[in-house]
Amino acid sequence: MKKSLAIIGAGPSALAAAIYTTREDIPTVLYEKGVVGGLAAITDKVENYPGFPSGVEGMILANQFQSQAERFGADIEFGEVSSVKKLNNAIEIIVDNKPILADAVLIATGSSYKKTGMPGEDDFYGKGVHYCATCDGAFYRDKKIAVIGGGNSAIQEAIFLTRFASHIDLLVRSKIRASDVLQKELKKYIDEGKITVHLKTTPQKILSLEGKINGIEINQEDDIKQLEVEGVFVFIGLNPNTGFLQGSGIELDEQGLIKTNSRLETNIPGIFASGDVRSGATMQIASAVGEGASAALSIREYLESQKH
Ligand SMILES: Cc1cc2nc3c(=O)[nH]c(=O)nc-3n(C[C@H](O)[C@H](O)[C@H](O)COP(=O)(O)OP(=O)(O)OC[C@H]3O[C@@H](n4cnc5c(N)ncnc54)[C@H](O)[C@@H]3O)c2cc1C
């Protein structure tokens, strides 16, 4: 009997892996609890995926990934995986309370960006409220924006966004927790007047006019103010989608992302991880796809080795 692969998730990384494994004649089933195409499918416009010089709608890109994987025989099933367990001769995953056995498993469940929960955040998701500076920063050339967060990633991304934005209001809940090096660099932008830091500040709500963001209301030590901005970038952390791996024995890093070796294999032989759920991932579609392809080649090698 042919050795099989179960992929958890059907985002870009999973679909890229499936294109490779199905072409290698490895029976491949993907289990998806939400939207096929993952975060890419809910992204308005993707401007940095190679091969699309004028950009591409996230949903269209996701549909293309799906069609290509299905053309070679990938089977996409809807269901939520709640556990992964290595048995003697197989790996068991539980999908909607049903046990499924496979010879290898790829975990490609991605990560969710933490939200502030303020009113308007969801309404303007991807259309004024953003979670990725590399992806969406260029939309704010010569515009005023707000950045929310005080950790390393928020400071790093705020500095990156100075390439585009004319001014950045940096909203920090308590104090800045970034490294000394980053804080020194930040000071240069503060001195130039490019970034204004608001400490002890919580965002209250997104303000808008005719369907477009025109400001943000903030609370700074009980003083309610309104700042004029056209975009808001939120960098308050990530929630890797790895809760279901509790008790699996799969090693995670301190953020909860899956640790792998250079072959994208976890500490448990036969269980691989790729894309935004992997420790060290760069949280981009192109890299998630690249990792999916690399994982597929490692999986092929692993399954070959199990035949003898
Ligand atoms: C608003 C926004 C805009 C972005 N814009 C860009 C951009 O312009 N360019 C760019 O390169 N990147 C962009 N990104 C980042 C990009 O979308 C991600 O890096 C990419 O989608 C990661 O792919 P992935 O397959 O690793 O994970 P995901 O896309 O997160 O897919 C994971 C899938 O796994 C499923 N899943 C999770 N847990 C389970 C479970 N237990 N059982 C079954 N299924 C499960 C999820 O439902 C999801 O569909 C953007 C992200 C956001 C949020």
Image: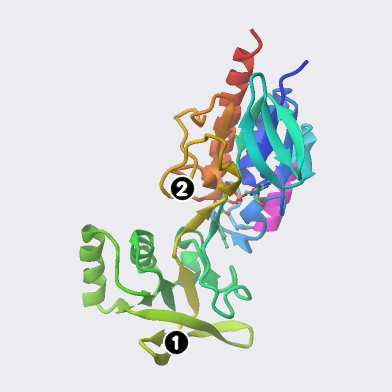
- Residue that badge 1 annotates: 228
Seen from the viewer's position, the closer of residues 268 and 249 is 249
Question: Is residue 142 something one can see in this rendering?
Answer: no
* 107 relative to 181, above or below: above
**Residue drawn at 21 percent across, 60 percent down:** 180
SS state under label 2? loop
* 70 relative to 184, above or below: above
Mark 1–mark 2 distance (CA, rounded to whole Å)? 31 Å
The kind of residue tagged 2 is Thr
Horizontal side of residue 245 vs 191, given as left or right: right
Q: Which mark identifies residue 138? A: none
The reply to whether the residue tagged 2 has its Cβ within 8 angstroms of ligand 1 is: yes
Question: Few, some or many C-alpha atoms within 10 Å of disc 2 (few <14, some 14-19, many ≥20)?
Answer: few
Quadrant in which the C terminus appears: top right
* 305 relative to 207, above or below: above
How are the colours assigned in the image? rainbow
The kind of residue tagged 1 is Glu
- Residue that badge 2 annotates: 282
Secondary structure of the magenta portion, mostly? Answer: helix
Q: Quadrant of residue 200?
A: bottom left
The reply to whether the residue tagged 1 has its Cβ within 8 angstroms of ligand 1 is: no
Range covered by the magenta-colored residues: 57-67
Seen from the viewer's position, the closer of residues 187 and 244 is 244
Horizontal side of residue 67 vs 242, given as left or right: right
* 163 relative to 300, above or below: below
Q: Which residue of the protein is positioned furthest toward the top in this rendering?
A: 308
Q: Earlier in the sequence, mark 1 or mark 2?
A: 1
